[in-house]
Amino acid sequence: MTRLRFALLNAAHDGANTRRNFRRELDADLVEFDAVAGDLPDHTEFDGVVVTGSRSSVYWDEAWIPPLVDYVAEAADAGVPVLGVCYGHQVLAEALGGRVAGMDGFEIGYNEIRRPRDDPLFEGIDETFTAFTTHGDAVVELPPSATLLAENDRGVHAFRDGHCWGVQFHPEYDIDTARDVTDGKRDQIGDARVDGVLESITPDAYDAACEAKQLFENFTGYAERLAAERAERAAADD
């Protein structure tokens, strides 16, 4: 089978860390689009679509956001596997009929997440796992046909709807990204909290969070199986 081809919809305003992290974690050819600049695919002929994090909120009045939400809805409707991470998770929720709202406070740092049920995306990941989180918005209403896959006391951390998954946490982060993102939150959450989180970003904490990186391999494997099934059906029709 030929190598998988994913659309990477980069919603990060400064995409260098984001680009590095996703290109490291996803074993596929990535066709990158600068979603913030309004650059989106004009088709859904991909083996998968991945939507990244962003410092924006999905409900902000910014011209590039509705087209991104619409494209994700179109890809999902076409049966393309979609993985949304943090902001991408919120975009996916909105695209499928859910709702996102601001949180009471801000979740940041290495935090514990629970998954109440099994799912192919979380195969090989413990029922309680550690991941880096950084968000002030949350999915407050799941899409009507979605299934909750993971949560903690700050809300929804993963859901599935058909071939689509959203995860609120950041399995793609390396230590440098976690530190850069945290240090950039000083105006938002204050120096004292930022310094405390920075102290907690240690090699041991990162090693514990690496367990969640398995979901990238799981997503790629799912997309590969789906592509193979479609190829077999197409060959049979010929």
Image (spheres, helix red, strand yellow):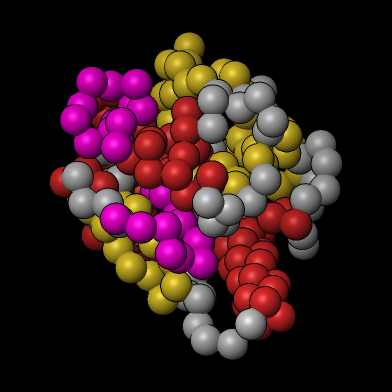
Depth order, front residue of 59/81: 81
Q: Is residue 87 visible?
A: no
Residue 53 painted magenta: yes
Residue 91 lies, with reference to residue 188, above or below; the image says: below
Q: Is residue 1 visible?
A: yes
Quarter holding residue 173: bottom left
Residue 175 painted magenta: no
Instruction: Residue lying at the far top in this picture: please name it.
Output: 104
Residue 17 lies, with reference to residue 30, above or below; the image says: above
Dominant SS of magenta comes to: loop
55 relative position to 223: left or right: left
Residue range corresponding to the magenta coloring: 42-67
The image shows residue 130 at horizontal and vertical percentages of: 64, 46
The image shows residue 141 at horizontal and vertical percentages of: 59, 19
Instruction: Residue lying at the far right in this picture: please name it.
Output: 117
Depth order, front residue of 36/191: 36
